[in-house]
Amino acid sequence: MAYGGSWNASGVLPTRAVCGEADGTPTPAAYAGSHCISRWNSLDPSQGGGSQRLMVATTYRRQIAERWDPRATAFTLHSNLQLFTNDGITAPFQADGILYGSEIEQDDTRTETGATVRLSHRGAIGSIAVQSTFGLQLRDDDIEAQLHRTQARRQLDGVDANIPGPIVDDTVNETELAAWFEENVRPLKWLRFVIGAREDRIDVAVNSESQTAVNQASGVRGAAQLSPKATAMRRG
């Protein structure tokens, strides 16, 4: 599966400059009378962006001896996003915002790969139907994230001492690993119990790729969580 797209955006518009609307503040002379703008217009026509995505996936399933049901899926996905926004507000890292404006470029490129394996077994304890399911899940994300000061979609990295480089230029690796089991027990036609548990582990590593980036952050952190569950269902 693959797709891509691009768009233009109107962004933030001051109400006092839009035709037929007002917020009680004086209308600037540049937008007074017939010079007002449509709500579909933009003060910065370079706002917008583009995105592309490509994904390949495969699935395997086979029934064994009428009781065992193994399944496996695997995928890889590559995507990128380029977004240009201009809120018209000079942020703290934009000391010379009046000179260059407040447009920001956000870039996100990532490759995701993952796989899920599960095995189900249908059996019985006496006359009670029981289905057991066990599974493993793995996913890895490699991300390149950047944030730049821009003007009319032109990067301003290093243009002067107040903009030494990108705002952010990081690589991120995120790995997720999970294991779970589930027991589905039906002692009666109208009563079913489901019990199980899932253990999740997430590890993230961040590394700043630019020595001139305004915001630099590097480090490694991980966490795990156990999520038990128990459910009783009655069919009327």
Image: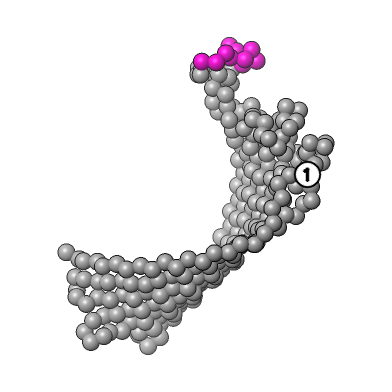
Queried whether the magenta region covers residue 44, the answer comes back as no
Instruction: Say which amino acid is labelled 1.
Output: Gly
Which residue shows up at 75% across the image and 30% down it? 96
Q: Which residues are magenta?
A: 24-33
Name the image quarter holding residue 176: bottom right
x then y, percent, for residue 6: 62, 44
Which residue shows up at 26% across the image and 80% down it? 129
Left or right side of 8 for 196? left
Read off the residue under disc 1: 165
In the image, residue 233 sits, relative to residue 6, either above or below, namely: below
Left or right side of 124 for 51? right
User: Is residue 57 in view?
Assistant: no
Which residue shows up at 64% across the image and 12% down it? 29
In the image, residue 57 sits, relative to residue 60, either above or below, namely: above
- From the viewer's side, name the closer residue of 178 and 93: 93
Secondary structure beneath label 1: loop
Q: Residues within 10 Å of mark 1 (few under 14, many from 20)?
A: many
Q: How is the image coloured?
A: one colour
In the image, residue 63 sits, relative to residue 171, either above or below, namely: below
x then y, percent, for residue 75: 56, 67
x then y, percent, for residue 158: 82, 41
User: Is residue 94 in view?
Assistant: yes
- From the viewer's side, name the closer residue of 65 and 150: 150
Magenta segment main secondary structure: loop
Count of marks placed on residues? 1
Queried whether the magenta region covers residue 30, the answer comes back as yes
Viewport quadrant of the N terminus: bottom right
Which residue shows up at 77% across the image and 51% down it? 210
x then y, percent, for residue 5: 60, 47
Viewport quadrant of the C terminus: bottom left
